[in-house]
Amino acid sequence: MAERTFLDGLRDRATRLRIHSIRATTAAGSGHPTSCCSAADLVAALFFDVMRFRPAEPQAVDNDRFILSKGHAAPLLYAAWVEAGALSPDSLLTLRRIDSDLEGHPTPRLPFVDVATGSLGQGLSTGVGMALAARMDESDRTVFVLLGDGECAEGSVWEAAQIAGHYRLDGLVAIIDVNRLGQSQATMLEHDVQAYRKRFEAFGWRAIVVEGHDMGQVVKSLRSARRRSGRPVAVVARTVKGKGIPEVEDRDGWHGKPLPADTAKRAIDSLERQLHGATLPDVRPPTRRPASLAAPSRLVPMPAPAYEIGASVATRQAYGEALAKLGKLNPAIVAVDGDVKNSTYAERFLEACPSQYVEGFIAEQNMVGTGVGLGVCGKIPFVSTFACFLTRAFDQLRMAAISRANLKASGSHCGVSIGEDGPSQMGLEDLAMFRAVPGSVILYPADAVSAERCVELAAGHRGIVYIRTTRPKTPVLYGPDEPFDIGGLKVVRQDAADRVTVVAAGVTLHEALRAWAELRQRGLAIRVIDLYSVKPLDRPGLLAAARATGGRLITVEDHYAEGGLGAAVLDAVAGEGIRVHKLAVTELPRSGAPEALLDRYGISARHIVETVLEIAPGG
Amino acid sequence: MAERTFLDGLRDRATRLRIHSIRATTAAGSGHPTSCCSAADLVAALFFDVMRFRPAEPQAVDNDRFILSKGHAAPLLYAAWVEAGALSPDSLLTLRRIDSDLEGHPTPRLPFVDVATGSLGQGLSTGVGMALAARMDESDRTVFVLLGDGECAEGSVWEAAQIAGHYRLDGLVAIIDVNRLGQSQATMLEHDVQAYRKRFEAFGWRAIVVEGHDMGQVVKSLRSARRRSGRPVAVVARTVKGKGIPEVEDRDGWHGKPLPADTAKRAIDSLERQLHGATLPDVRPPTRRPASLAAPSRLVPMPAPAYEIGASVATRQAYGEALAKLGKLNPAIVAVDGDVKNSTYAERFLEACPSQYVEGFIAEQNMVGTGVGLGVCGKIPFVSTFACFLTRAFDQLRMAAISRANLKASGSHCGVSIGEDGPSQMGLEDLAMFRAVPGSVILYPADAVSAERCVELAAGHRGIVYIRTTRPKTPVLYGPDEPFDIGGLKVVRQDAADRVTVVAAGVTLHEALRAWAELRQRGLAIRVIDLYSVKPLDRPGLLAAARATGGRLITVEDHYAEGGLGAAVLDAVAGEGIRVHKLAVTELPRSGAPEALLDRYGISARHIVETVLEIAPGG
């Protein structure tokens, strides 16, 4: 096909994308047509010239991938897949309806959406993960991420940019749609495309500035970007918001607003007149199907844990050892750590499986987003840092849930038991955070054996799993053959005479065991439960214990009183009229020795004993 | 004093800072002496030559300010204040003890610490807030922020950098201690100081590269940095981790490790031999006390709300109107919004009080950090964005609590009631997040009058207050003189015959009122509570209502089931054996019309009616 005719065909595709986007949002009565129109030429060139993929098999491993980081331009994405033949044009008119999978922002309810977007600044991190996976798998697929200019204000974009630059991820292309206007006013940099170029270059990228509505330039630059050059590539495109809709082009106050019916009609008429009637270019398939990219095999189970009962081992160390052990058997397991691998013990995994490890440096948002991207590509990603620093990535975790991601996170150094480093390093809200992530699993082992089993359970579970580990060493409680399950609990002390049930996990389980011993001296029996699976939890098991002990439950946790283990237990049993006495950290803690802090903040054996004596009849 | 002698005096100060840092951490048995030593020359020059402050009045408004963003170098900070005469040298030997305010990372338990640090990458945002406050107050004080090189991997640093560049905050100086080594390995950029320079320049800064142990160069560059030049200034200092301790200098594996006693002794002996015995330079006081910087006056109260009962107004709009009204009366009120001011209605404040508004763009971490910094300087900052995007700043909120910050946050667009935009835009975990912030207050108004009162309550309360607002319009329920209090609730429907109490807030209160009307038709009376103060909550009020209605409580909330309003109620009453039936969102929602989504996810009037009928005797 002659170049001129070919470009006209792409221009027609772009025009059709605009028409679809306007029609869909006007039908829906809400949405972002102007944000679609600025990027229509870029997306047309990507889908119908530059990217190599099979529309009927959107998840095929050899496909190039496209992430719409500026998720509010969802209709443009849907329109592109309509034009590619993977969606019916009629479906666009169901946009944003409760019975439609064409949601307001893209979600993986649609087969061609790898990750949900719509919280800005997250797509590039996902792209980093997908590009890293491609490199590990020796695939030549390229990952394209379309970002808005406004979203480049998100620090997470620069976390991703620096990591991509550092690892020279030349399979990653960022396209910046510099349309000058944010939601409520102009962006900081407006049309200063050179500033974007300088920033990406300073972060180790090759950057190309392009007129985003000049199809010839767009095609040339994107083709160039797809070629491997030892660096990731940023295509900085100067565009006009609302391009193709003369009444709103480049005008403030038109973000997130559908066109009224008459304006839409005029715009569509005008766009239709721009169609060249050229032959429309087709999607280009990938050139190869790499053999190494087979679906991940089932998890190879680990041999039984090798710890001796009574030995003193920190659960964070057991986490690292278990991950190393599992990783050697399962090449799909990948770990990313935030420059604390000597604290989280992810370094054990690095030592054992160096090619499966990615150093994430001190950039937790990108670490989580990268994990999501690795998971999309069939890896089983474990990301780790201090529990408190995972709060940095709450929005990424929230979006991971909407993305139905397969992601494992480990937070070490939970609670006041970390001691002298003080409150800034204590994870005291991580359980509340992960409990509020829909569909998540939360595992909180109290000893090395259960920690090892939790790692295995996490790897085998499809979804988001959080493993909470503890800084100080704790004694091994369980034998090598003890079974653990997601949703299980262990009754570690019981007797027919038990008068109260104490529910604990992690470091507080050992406090509960101390309390048990002390109370036994006084002739008072208590039941002790290890609630290693905080979410889901074994409600029947908890109820049975509570009923066997007069309906009296004490929860004790190294976490703030809100939203943690005690709250989980309350949620499970409160409807049954069972009274729960919650011991938790109820004020801002300070530096000090771990044991002193457990005691000062009311979660030591002494407090458990006192609470038992207070509530147990005859206690 | 001759320049040579003067520099020797500064060198001696630096040497003494190293000695103090080594001694303190070895005595504590933990801590980060090597991270102190790399920055000792920089801090000596700052404290004893460049900064203008009064050590005895560390919070005086005319002082230059210093933020140790690399908070793990806390002993260096404490040592500097010892040398400045504000702390006794002996106190250094109490470092990290439970009875000492010299915590492992700095907290405002010490009078010279404005904000807690230790979660990396947050100090520069605080500095932005403090520099903005200085500009608003026409103060010439300069804010110095010392960052580690490793922490520059945090995206929040670049959020702050871009905003400082955009606003040309020439009262802000960042000093980057490029010591090459992170916690677990070398940083990405190692000693590539030019890369840091390029990055800061690309983000709109003036950048100076300096040898960080050459006191002459350090002094010259920091003096130059303090001079106003229309741009913020980054001093990129090439340093050596552990400088001055020959056995560990520039060696990996020595992060966060105190020196063993013998190594410490050898290091201190060697450092003491380096002392010149020069006259030590003193701290320099500020040149003026600007009159405009008086302590903020008491809040001028607003006139009563002017809404008509039954009028339809979104609480987010009432938030913006109230803030504008309050801001006009109180110049200390400042608002920052994340480029959604036309959605949160912060634009009303911008229109009314333009000089008190700062556009924060799409950078929520920096927005919250900036708010903290504004609060330190006597402003009453209100930051706003969609409720879900505040999750982006959970770590900043966590640190704000440790900083005992005076910060108000408003999250609009909570819950599934936002409708068609879909799950990425729905705040469904914000209550869980803010409840887990120690000392926080959470207000969740259901109508315009209470929203206006909540803004006033928030402004008048010293601490962290979260105001949750709703997207759709809701009818005005309360008259202009209705009183509201932090920790209060409203019984909006009651009768002696009530058989169940329904506790709701925000949009679900209106669903509860619909259920009340429908049940009344059926001859069944229910009590309805508006729990507008979710934290703290009125426990006696809840218990009284529960007891008056047979111990039967239903909670209904537009939030996930974990950690929200229902959890707060459970926490308050479960110890009393009261059964709580929680209605909340229990799965990942999707796009759709607001009413349809409320119904689909089980929190509409219909579900309340059904639950009442299920549990009310004879219902």
Image: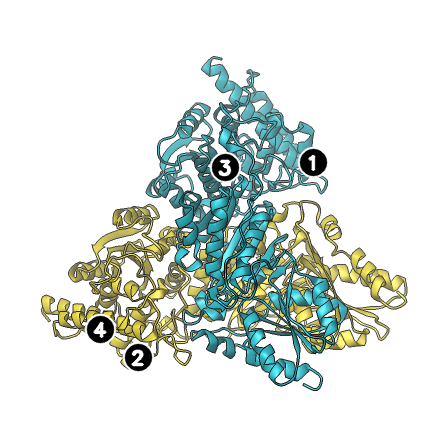
Chain colours: A cyan, B yellow
Say which residue label 2 marks: B87
When asked about the image quadrant of residue A487, the answer is bottom right
> Disc 2 is attached to a residue of which chain?
B
Do callouts 3 and 1 point to residues on the same chain?
Answer: yes
Mark pair 1, 2: CA separation: 68 Å
Foreground: disc 3 or disc 1? 1
Do callouts 4 and 1 point to residues on the same chain?
Answer: no
> Disc 1 is attached to a residue of which chain?
A
For label 3, the crowd category at 10 Å Cα-Cα, with few meaning under 14, some 14 to 19 and many 20 or more, is some
Can you give x and y, in whole percent of width and height, for residue A137 in the image?
46, 35
Say which residue label 4 marks: B265
Out of A577 and A164, give the one closest to the viewer.
A577
> Disc 3 is attached to a residue of which chain?
A
Residue at image x 39%, y 58%? A342
Amino acid residing under circle 3: Asp
Q: Which mark is residue A250?
A: 3
Can you give x and y, in whole percent of width and height, for residue B418 in the image?
65, 51
Q: Secondary structure at mark 2?
A: loop
Q: Which mark is residue A94?
A: 1
> Disc 4 is attached to a residue of which chain?
B
Question: Quick check: B50 left or right of A399?
Answer: left
Amino acid residing under circle 2: Leu
Do callouts 3 and 2 point to residues on the same chain?
Answer: no
Question: Quick check: B308 left or right of A602?
Answer: right
Mark pair 2, 4: CA separation: 23 Å
Foreground: disc 4 or disc 1? 4
